[in-house]
Amino acid sequence: MPAGQDPQPTPGGTAVPAGSRTAAWYRHFGSVEAPGSSPCYAEWTLGIADDPQLIARIDRWPHHKRQPNLLLAAARFLGAEPGPFAQFRDFLEARWDDVSSTVLTRSTQTNEAGRCATLLPSLAAISVAEAKPLALLEVGASAGLALYPDRYGYEYDDGTTVSRLSPGPDGAAAAPVLKCVTSGAVPVPAALPPVVWRAGVDLNPLDVGDPDDVAWLEALVWPEQEFRRARLRQAVAIARQDPPLLVAGDLNEQLLDLAAQAPADTALVVFHSAVMGYLTARGRAEFRQTMLHLAATRGVHWLSNEGHMVIYQEDGSNVVPEVDPQRIMGRFLLTHNGHPVAITGPHGQSLEWL
């Protein structure tokens, strides 16, 4: 809420201070990000935004732990069931210590395989242009499920025609089918690109062989989106058959060494989705310099798939000033080597080619 406006009244007659950044964060999530995807999360986060006691409790956590997705996932991980906000409020009251403990020890490591649908056209084009198979390196890889674009099925729907891609008869039956609505001249490939090396770095990589880690991944899926939970399980099964190389550590400290392990006769692609928001402006600047170094020395391709924070950095600079941030709100901007190519749905559900 802009400064200077009156506080928002709550059903109990109290009010959330107009200057509460945390309340504004939850209100934005409930009014912009969740509607259309999760009515339950929209109701819950709007309820939290108007609840001074809950906001005060959340504000006791470090800033990077206050994000709506993390609190919601922690509650779901502990057994919170979809329902009215009053029911959810009672759950939080009864289990707050457990929720707080989970929030402080976990992080939002949503591993959305669906994002491969928005990355695939660029990945295929890179492989064709280089006439080489791909080596994939994901920063902020979580459990590495986005490292298998060649193992999934796809349906691209432009409103007139549906283009389908399959990993082949051997893997088609078990592969999730990633459905994506497209607009603009999306270069849908004729075939899936070959991937011969896959690796990732994460502060805390998740293990697809660990039931607790998989349960956390499932808790990060929004309540009404059972199709996402089903394809998560399919993607986990694929990753278990051929686990990727995952390295624990800071991406700025691990990236160069990990990139050096990629086979020399491949087209190396470093990519990330919804990761840069976890870095400071200095950390993002360091990452960009590392990518420029890799581009100059290794010829690496850089695919960035991030939310509107790629426009407005903490230091006020504009990384992609040619794209109106209002156009991206609630969606991601996909760039290839720093050049905007598409606006994407955050879970891979849409691809608008620029």
Image (cartoon, rainbow, N blue to C red):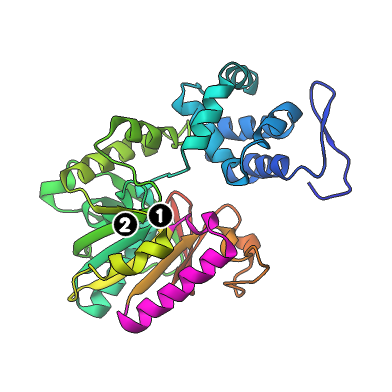
Q: Is residue 4 visible?
A: yes
Q: Residue at point 20% right, 42% down? A: 240
Q: Which residue is mark 1?
A: 140
Q: Residue at point 15% right, 47% down? A: 171
Q: Nearer the viewer, residue 190 or 50?
A: 50
Which secondary structure lies at badge 2? Answer: strand
Q: Nearer the viewer, residue 198 or 223?
A: 198
Q: Amino acid at mark 1?
A: Gly
Q: Nearer the viewer, residue 43 or 204?
A: 204
Pointer 2 local density, CA inside 10 Å: few below 14, some 14–19, many at least 20: many
Q: Which residue is mark 2?
A: 200
Q: Quadrant of residue 229?
A: top left
Pointer 1 local density, CA inside 10 Å: few below 14, some 14–19, many at least 20: many
Q: Residue at point 76% right, 42% down? A: 20
C-beta proximity under 8 Å, tags 1 and 2: yes
| Marking on residue 96 | none
